[in-house]
Image: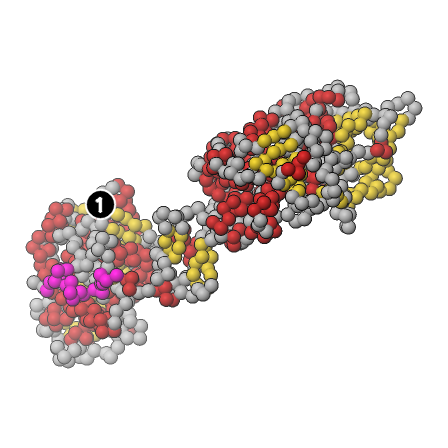
Amino acid sequence: MVKQYRPEANRHDPFVAVSWESTRVFKTGAQRSEKPVFINKIPPCRQACPMGIDIPTAFHLASKGDIDGALEVFLRENPLPGVCGRVCYHPCEAECNRGSFDEPVGVRSLERFVSDHGTFDVAGDGASGSKKEQIAVIGSGPAGLSACYHLARFGYHVTLIEARAELGGMLRYGIPPYRLPRPILERELERIMSLGVHAKVETTVGRDISWEELQSFDALFLSVGLQAAKSLPELNPPGPAMITGLDFLADPGRWFLEDDSNKVLIIGGGNVAIDAARTLMRIRRGRGSNITLVCPESREHMPALPEEIEEALEEGVIIVNGWAPHRLHKDGGGPISLDFQRAEVRIGRQTGNIEITTVGREVQSYPVDTIIVAIGQHLGTQSLPPGIDIDDGKIVTDRCGRASLPNVFTGGDAMGGRAFVADALADGKRGAVAISCLLEGKDMEEELQISGIGQGLAVSTEHYRRGSETDTDALKAVVTYEHMNTLFFSECTRRNPEHLMAEARVKSFDEVICGLEPSAMAEEVSRCFNCGTCIDCEMCLDFCPDLSIIRDAESGIYRFDADYCKGCGVCSVACPRGVVEMAGETS
Amino acid sequence: MRMLLTGNHAAAYGARLTKPQVIAAFPITPQSPIYEKLSEWDGEGILGGRMMRVESEHSAMAACIGASLTGVRTFTATASQGLALMHELLHFASGVRAPIVMVNVNRSLAAPWSFWSEQTDSLSQRDTGWIQFYAADNQEALDTVIQAYRISETVFLPSMVVLEAFYTSHFLEPVEVPDQDQVDEFLPPFEPAFRLDPDNPAAFSQTVTQDQYAQFRIKRHIAMEDAVEVAEYVDTQYKEQFGRGYGLLDCYRLEDAEAVLVTSGTIGSTARVAIDSLREEGKRAGLARIRLFRPFPKAQVIEALKHANKVAVIDRNLSVGQEGIFCEELKSALYTAIDGIPVFGFVLGLGGTNVSPLHIRGVFDFMERYDHAPGKQIFDIEERNG
């Protein structure tokens, strides 16, 4: 009837433009002036972490249910995830990019969770004892423990010398169990000891063992802390009993303060003062009418962590701000009172030290039976290696933590760093890397710089151990919120851990903050943006209009197909995490 | 089965009987009841194919093109602004020779805003390479949808079946709905000439050379010319099987007619009443309603008008600055074929205004008074009468 329109009649003379040839002959890559570069970067949380923990990777593993893997990520950089998961001041959360979106991610909650629910054998990699050098670490607080842990993982033989009967330093004798339950500390100590660290307790250097004897070690790490509490000599008895905060915390039962008729004044605004007040509240089983904390700082300038202050107030501690102790006085046969003067606190412009000045003549008096003084510590008469340089009560060091004596390094409070566990742990880690450099003839400043995280002070021992395996540039570039493509994320409320009710918790030393339940943790881990960390979301691959992004099946590494990538940059815009960037074709 | 249906529902039944596998559409007055009826059947699970609810008419046509290339039968429906939005892809559909069938319900184009019948929307798409049918009533709408698939799938060109806003789209008429097995027998499953097949990859509509482009255009034109013959054949076959045929021109009392009205759509059925009354008065009036506008059935038109002395054309459309579009097309067909026949061009019913039997009488009266047609289109019969 009409002419044939069937395919077989038209294949060689089609009536529609159709081609069965491959378009691969068109090498569109020739149009490219820029190319995508796939490179992981440092998220602000990791830069802020004194230990430089790879937080986004830990979150990614946890989000896939790999709690052991996430624990391993923490343990690469931090020997005490169970401790830090409870007491860290979490600077990571303050810098979290998600904070610009809705609320910061609960990093501390995860650290605690993986420590409580995960298992990982740090001794399993077989490095322990692989090197011949002997190192002595003096003092088993967080700085010393961190040095032991990392040195042992590098393969050195480590001897840990501790003056007290038990290991842990301030972790044991300074942090009350309602913040850090002792079984948690024991578990962490056990993990460090499993690396073959040889501990000698009840050994005071200078008394039980001489500094000369220690010269047989290849290097020393001094983490002796600040063992002498500052006092207020002008208030000395006769009169009320005076106890230092640290002495009180080390053994609260020893001071016979259980009776709430004993009027106690705590002087100081730091964590020790707050801990003393809260501990006293507990040994009095919540009867807090005669527990008052007075400090010269205003509430917002108190050195104690805001969350600690908040919890103390909830528990009924009375905090009086802006007053400095002046004198004790007694009117006739009445009780002894402590007079306070209105005070202001400034940071000395030259010294950087806290300067307290009294203002006006106004005086406030508090009747007192016992004064707990918690206004800081100093080196005191601590035995130190002969000839070591001391300045302003601190051991003098160079930027690598090396003291004025050969092969002697230091960290922690004795070196005058920040008085937080995480910072002490970071000092121990830096000391370990520096000692390793010394013993292996490497340039320690350069190595610390190479292994430094972002623009901050943290050093990655993982990176130091692996050396050339990772790209050092990647450790320096930081992903800001502006680098992120947040279109892929939706708002989600942060899951915060529950706290014991104040009325209940003051009656015991039970842990105040509860860990997140697995279901809540699962929600929280999904909130992490994994900034700067490729988690194989494959948005780049999905959005590439030229099908030119290729994931190597074996290595998992992404690359672009140079023959066809036009350099349009869609992949770099699509990347939610700031991993894909465009670079000049010639670079 | 005999049912009382609106033109929209008749078209929807027609579409369902052809078993389209993909329907992509977007609602627009006065076409929406087609979309709604198909959606209703989809919801009841009796549609058979898949209903794609897209975000615009442009996407609807794009989806139909893609689906059609994979070798499935596709259907869509639109009107007025929706058709205008599709314009780019109408060229594409015919260029890739996708035998899509679309119902367009004529509606006046903005501005100003209006909802009533006028053919300018579909006639504006005259040169897109689509076959165009204009139906006069609801039964014809249903029958033409079925015929259109058979024609389109033979010559590989898309078809537009045109209804009129409200005059057909929303008026109920008794409609004979054919049995499914009868339709299945009439319309074999669609076999594409070239299939978009992931297992045998091909590029469709890739860049071609100037010469290749010219050749594809000419092939498309030849296929369109072939479609006249195919449409005539399909209509004959349809009549054989279902008892209803329309021809490419629907001719009424034309055998001995001296004055012949040429028109399209619903005015064509109204005209029958006027012609009957003129015939009662002894006037030799006749009607040729053009059903197939593209391809324009030149030979059939010439054949139908060969005995006429005068021809009047009523257009419910206007090519602004020219004249009524059917009139223009008719003149083009008649030129040189029938020497010196006067063609009176009337443009009536714009914006959906009513064209009654009295108006049509007026057209014949007008023609009777003049030996020669005026050189331009006539908008107002009364004025000329006076």
Q: Is residue A294 left or right of residue B147?
A: right
- In what element is the residue under mark 1? loop
Question: Which of the pair B105/A481 is nearer the observer?
Answer: A481
The percent coordinates of residue A366 (x first, y second) are 82, 29
- Residue A569 lies in quadrant: bottom left
Q: Is residue A367 left or right of residue A198?
A: right
Residue under pointer 1: B48
**Residue B113 visible to an observer of this rendering:** no
Give the residue drawn at x 75%, y 20%.
A256
Give the residue drawn at x 48%, y 43%.
A57
- Residue B66 lies in quadrant: bottom left
**Residue B58 visible to an observer of this rendering:** yes
**Magenta span of residues:** A3-22
Give the residue drawn at x 13%, y 49%.
B184
Q: Is residue A401 left or right of residue A460?
A: right
Magenta-colored segment: predominant secondary structure: loop
